[in-house]
Image (cartoon, helix red, strand yellow):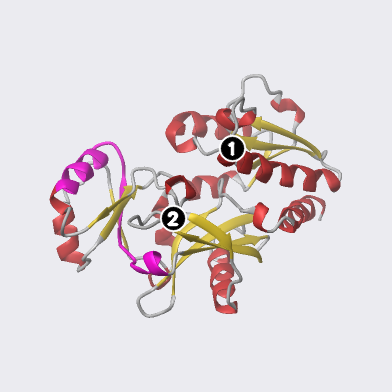
Amino acid sequence: MGLNIVILTEDRYEAPSKKNSYINNILKEDFLLFYALKKLGFNVMRSSWSSKKFNWETVDFAIFRTTWDYFERLDDFLNWINTYSRKIKFINSIDLIKWNLDKSYLQDFPKEDVVPSLFLTKNSHKSLKEISIQKGWNELIIKPSISAAAWNTHRVSAENINEMELVFSNLKSSHKMIVQEFQKSVLTSGEISIMVFGGKYSHAVLKKSKKNDFRVQDDFGGTVCKYEPKKTEIDFAEKIVSLCPERPLYARVDILLSKSGGFLLSELEIIEPELWFRFCEKSADFLAKKIYESIIF
């Protein structure tokens, strides 16, 4: 087997004709890893996962990076990974990718380590009021079980629960849903994202929402800064990764502070997480080394 590897993106970001700070960050992230792999002797390419022009026969490995449209084209994406996983070794593995596609993976972790969550099938008859009363949750977060980047994610409180019932009803008519207890700590302490490569801590960032919003993603005006995590935070992130069905080569562990001052897993991203290399450029070299070691040894 050779060392031919393709960094996977999506159509919008493969060769964008117009650029802004958002696009420039995407390109910087991808090319930091591109050159880190190149330094280790890989023949590195970059392509949209859905490209009809790219010659997929020329690569041995594919690493998922900015394939951020997968949930919008889920059937196409599943067909693609099922087809090409027979010819190309995926990083992370196809089994991990399929496991992580649906947020129901959260049920595979100890309940005490996860934001309190309820998983609903499509067309569930449960209402938000019913869930709020049964669970004793004063505020809720609702989102499709297969989604990313806060897509169709809503905060529900006593003030808007009546209007959100219609939103919820429309969403669950076409999606499996996850309902979670809203963690107020996200408004004060933000969300910690810890990157774990090959099972070991790499670096971390702190994400905070803008005023009068709860979403920490920069798409919605959130801010991101480099963060030096405590040992307890690193230990928690590494523990979460160790509990995966198999060890991912890269993972982003998103953590919120609990009411008791402990840690709660918000999400574990192991398909196409933003890894924030630009806040710690040597981390791209660390991941490239882990990839190389996984192939050679």
Which residue appears at 50% of the width and 34% of the height? 78
The numbered mark, 1 or 2, whose residue comes first in the sequence reads: 1
Q: In the image, residue 107 lies at what x, y percent?
A: 39, 60
Regarding residue 125, the answer to whether it shows in the image is yes
Along the viewing direction, whichever of 50 and 203 lies nearer the viewer: 203
Which residue appears at 62% of the width and 44% of the height? 25
Taking the image as shown, residue 293 lies to the left or right of residue 27, namely right
Q: Image height check: is 43 above or below 241?
A: above
Secondary structure category for the residue under label 2: loop
Q: In the image, residue 232 lies at what x, y percent?
A: 55, 78
Along the viewing direction, whichever of 278 and 96 lies nearer the viewer: 278
Q: Which mark is residue 216?
A: 2
Q: Image height check: is 12 above or below 97?
A: above
Along the viewing direction, whichever of 245 and 117 lies nearer the viewer: 117
Q: Which residues are magenta?
A: 163-188
Marks 1/2: CA distance?
18 Å
- Which residue is identified by label 1? 23
Which residue appears at 65% of the width and 57% of the height? 279
Secondary structure category for the residue under label 1: helix
Q: Is residue 267 magenta?
A: no
Q: Quadrant of the C terminus?
A: bottom right
Along the viewing direction, whichever of 5 and 155 lies nearer the viewer: 155
The image quadrant of residue 203 is bottom right
Regarding residue 249, the answer to whether it shows in the image is no
Taking the image as shown, residue 188 lies to the left or right of residue 286, namely left
